[in-house]
Image (cartoon, grey):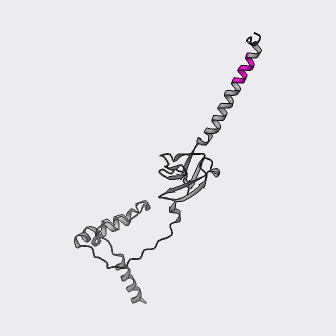
Amino acid sequence: MWGLIIFASDIDTIVLQMIKMRLFLLLLIAGTLQGFAQRRLVVVDVETMIPVVGANVISKDGNCTTDSLGYFSVSDSCKTLSFSHVNYESRLVNLNEVRDTVFLISKLLNIKEVVVFGHGQRQELPDALKKQLEVDKKDAQLAAIDPSSGNLLSLLAYLIPKKWRKNSKEARRKRLKQILENY
């Protein structure tokens, strides 16, 4: 009969043993599920720090692409990841070396200077197009004047017809001719 009687102190120990057993099972299950744990990483441009959208990520689990914010998920069981994108250099990364960000280098950085030489016949513009592209002499002169200079006399000189203006070249020639005659 004594075996059926349970004291309060025994109930506490039984409950503690059950709790310990449940914790042990939870830790055991968590340890086995740890292989299925996922990491969320982001792929960004190394210069602009802008997320790379649509980058291909290849791992042993399969292929995936980055979303509109540059994020993707991969399991912790993967050791290496391969990244590729049309505008970026391909990259192979060891997952142990990556925290949460993978940087890709733009292919545009590697473009060298290009020089283009043309060897061909020069085509003349049609006469109708030449007429439309011609600029009147007065319009060209007015366009060349800098209004910020504050010289309104030069602006008036272009607006007054030439026959009304005093010809400075002609006056200079006359003056030089007089000097030579008097010498």
Q: Is residue 131 left or right of residue 68?
A: left
Q: Is residue 74 left or right of residue 160?
A: right
Residue drawn at point x = 48 percent, y = 58 percent:
87
Q: From what the image shows, is residue 178 above or below residue 106?
A: below
Residue 157 in view:
no
Which residue is nearer to you in this view: 111 or 129?
111
Pinpoint residue 5: horizontal percent, then vertical percent: 74, 11
Pinpoint residue 15: horizontal percent, then vertical percent: 71, 20
Which residue is nearer to you in this view: 140 or 34?
34
Q: From what the image shows, is residue 66 above or below residue 129?
A: above
Q: Which residues are magenta?
A: 11-18
Pinpoint residue 82: horizontal percent, then vertical percent: 55, 55
Residue drawn at point x = 51 percent, y = 50 percent:
62
Q: Looking at the figure, which quarter contains the N terminus?
A: top right
Q: Main secondary structure of the magenta part?
A: helix
Residue drawn at point x = 67 percent, y = 27 percent:
22
Pinpoint residue 151: horizontal percent, then vertical percent: 41, 63
Q: Is residue 118 left or right of residue 53?
A: left
Residue 120 in view:
yes
Give the total number of marks visible in the rendering.
0
Q: Quadrant of residue 105?
A: bottom right
Q: Magenta includes 15?
A: yes
